[in-house]
Amino acid sequence: MTDINRRPGDGTGGLRSGTATYESLREQAIALRREGLSLRQIRDRLGIHNNNILNGLVKGEPPPEWTKRPNAKDDLRDRARELRLQGMTYDEIQVELGCSKSSISLWVRDLPKPERRRTSEEASAIARRGWQRTLEIREGERRQTKLEAASEIGPFSERDLFLVGVSLYWSEGSKDKAYDRRERAIFVNSDPGMVNVHLSWLRLLGVKGEHVRFAVTIHETADVAGAERFWADLTGVPPEQFLKTTLKRHNPKTTRKNTGESYHGCLAVRVLQSAGLYRRIEGWWCGIVGAAAQFDQLNRT
């Protein structure tokens, strides 16, 4: 275990002599940096979670090549300038490259403006195609980012599920108030993924299926029967565990945005006789808050 003693204002990130001196830690950090490790990997290897100290330890050492993000827009910029010199408009370049017209403007504004060769209708049609192309590229980037992020989660342990479940409940579940005692474990959400994680968490805690009840809440103008079937299929529970559906009355002064086939209302998951469970959930959440505060204090010192 690295013994890090801190003192402010000494120019060494707050470290002084101890089991591990600043100089010895710097030697280790530099060696790891030269082996090709990232700052995050060095942080985990040496157990140093103060960013100021960590950056000081590797100061002067260039990051490994694999951590440098390539500037993909350099090639786009060069290509945009080529197309502009060929006489293309911003809209035409956008169709060709899929980047935004604001970026194109910055890249080619010093180049001569091509002569107008099309009618306003033709130019508008090209502009629409260009914007559509930009949207398609952005959607592809969005999907790719989500896939990469999902793969970063890796193996999931029971403790991971336990902590996630406590956090989700405290975000979306019912809570007891000093002025209104309601110690009941009720979780409400419209996201099927959130509901599935919550049900997995309840099973991890040993809550029996027969002790859980479900209730749908949905707008009265939506497909009520379809929503009830959707949630029944998702949870895989018999109809008798579903309570009466609650209908939201329509306000004629408002325009509903939660429409379409993807709208299934919300599902309430109620655990019967759950006062004891609720108290434990509140205690678990307090424990998480206390643990997080310890990390925050470490990073502040």
Image (cartoon, rainbow, N blue to C red):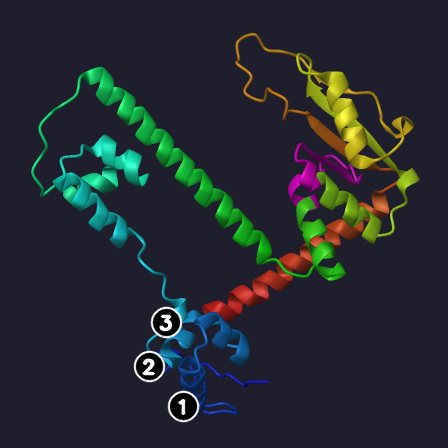
Q: CA distance from mark 3 to mark 2?
A: 29 Å
Image vertical order of residue 111 relative to residue 74, above or below: above
Tell me the amino acid under the disc marked 2. Gly
N-terminal of the pair, mark 1 or mark 2, is 2
Image vertical order of residue 276 relative to residue 29, above or below: above
Left or right: where does residue 82 sit relative to residue 194?
Answer: left
User: Dividing the image into 4 quarters, which one contains the N terminus?
Assistant: bottom right
Tell me the amino acid under the disc marked 3. Glu
Region of the chain picked out in magenta, as a range? 169-194
Left or right: where does residue 19 sit relative to residue 158?
Answer: left
Image vertical order of residue 27 relative to residue 152, above or below: below
Rendering quarter of residue 212: top right
Q: Are marks 1 and 2 in contact (CB under 8 Å)?
A: no
Q: What residue is rendered at 89% in x and 41% in y?
A: 209
Q: CA distance from mark 3 to mark 1?
A: 25 Å
N-terminal of the pair, mark 3 or mark 1, is 1
Q: Position of residue 67 (x, y in %)?
A: 40, 68
User: Does the magenta portion include 204?
Assistant: no
Q: What residue is rendered at 36% in x and 61% in y?
A: 69
Q: What residue is rendered at 44% in x and 72% in y?
A: 39
Q: Position of residue 118 (x, y in %)?
A: 17, 21
| Label annotation for residue 11 | 2
Check disc 3 and report its element: helix, strand or loop.
Answer: helix
Residue linked to disc 3: 65
